Image: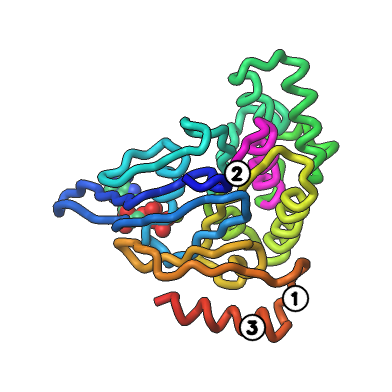
Amino acid sequence: MMDDVLISLRKISKSYKSENGIVKVIDDITMDIKKEFLVILGPSGCGKSTLLRIIAGVESYSGGEIYYASGRVPKIGFVFQFPSLLPWMTVIDNVSLPLKNMGLGKDEAKETAKRYLSLVGLSGFEELYPYELSGGMRQRVNLARALAIQPEILLMDEPFSNLDPLTAESLRAEVLDIWLSGITPLKAIVMITHSVDEAIFLADRIVILTPRPSKIAKELKVNLPRPRNRRSPEFEQLEDLVYSYVS
Ligand SMILES: Nc1ncnc2c1ncn2[C@@H]1O[C@H](COP(=O)(O)OP(=O)(O)O)[C@@H](O)[C@H]1O
Ligand SMILES: [Mg+2]
């Protein structure tokens, strides 16, 4: 394994057994995850969520191997497509819960939770319940909860696809700020999307998947300076290029 590689997937395949037989979802994916903002782009139903769960070490696979640089699954923060907050717990208790599960004392857990809520712009909302929040705020709480455990790798499964466009855009900017600021111990972000625009706006590198069963259609580096201007000719050129690989 190369020095800068955190996770290496080798010939990963995955099939599900269904009533109508075996469904092949992932077909021979070989890729490395480095210290980078990696975006995996693919059409709906191609196996993106399955792949992300495999990377997280919480889903079995049918063939191939995964190597982790540290020799074991690193500490991973996971942001799901739909905010998965416990409705009977306040915002701060939701964010504190995984910290307590990690063995932090009650006060330290709250203190840490508060810090990460402030990082995502939710100071003052600690004592509210999830139903009192907008969709965007709930997704912020999800992000704070994922970051509060101080993961090495942040996995995000279409985190912005259920938000209105303006909210999604401000959350994108904030995730990017957090990533670029280096104030967290994050070494990599792996985000899944079906949006070409989002992939080019955020990624250091894009891995494009084919429709199911997903294979890698193309890997592309995005060397555009940040903040990226969607109206620049370079952005639009890259957009054309990416679309040419999206079937
Ligand atoms: N637990 C499961 N059992 C059977 N089939 C599944 C299961 N999870 C996902 N699938 C099937 O695998 C395919 C890919 O699913 P998924 O990884 O969620 O795709 P994506 O996230 O790209 O939309 C879908 O066709 C889905 O029906
Ligand atoms: Mg999915």
**In terms of sequence position, does the residue under pointer 3 or pointer 2 come before the other?**
2
Instruction: Work out whether 197 lies above or below 212.
Output: below
Q: In the figure, is residue 59 to the left or right of 110?
A: left
Which residue is under mark 1? Answer: 229
> Any mark on residue 154, and which?
2
Which of the image's four quarters has the C terminus? bottom left
Q: Residue at x 56, y 41 (%)?
A: 78
Instruction: Work out whether 114 lies above or below 44.
Output: above
Q: Is residue 144 magenta?
A: yes
Residue 139, given in percent of the width and then of the height, sits at 65, 47
Residue 233, given in percent of the width and then of the height, sits at 69, 86
* Magenta stretch, overall SS: helix
Q: Residue at x 64, y 19 (%)?
A: 100
- The amino acid marked with disc number 1 is Asn
Q: Which residues are magenta?
A: 136-155
Tell me whether the residue at label 3 lies in contact with that at label 1, contact meaning CB atoms closer than 8 angstroms: no
- The amino acid marked with disc number 2 is Leu
Which residue is under mark 3? Answer: 236
Q: Residues within 10 Å of mark 2 (few under 14, many from 20)?
A: many
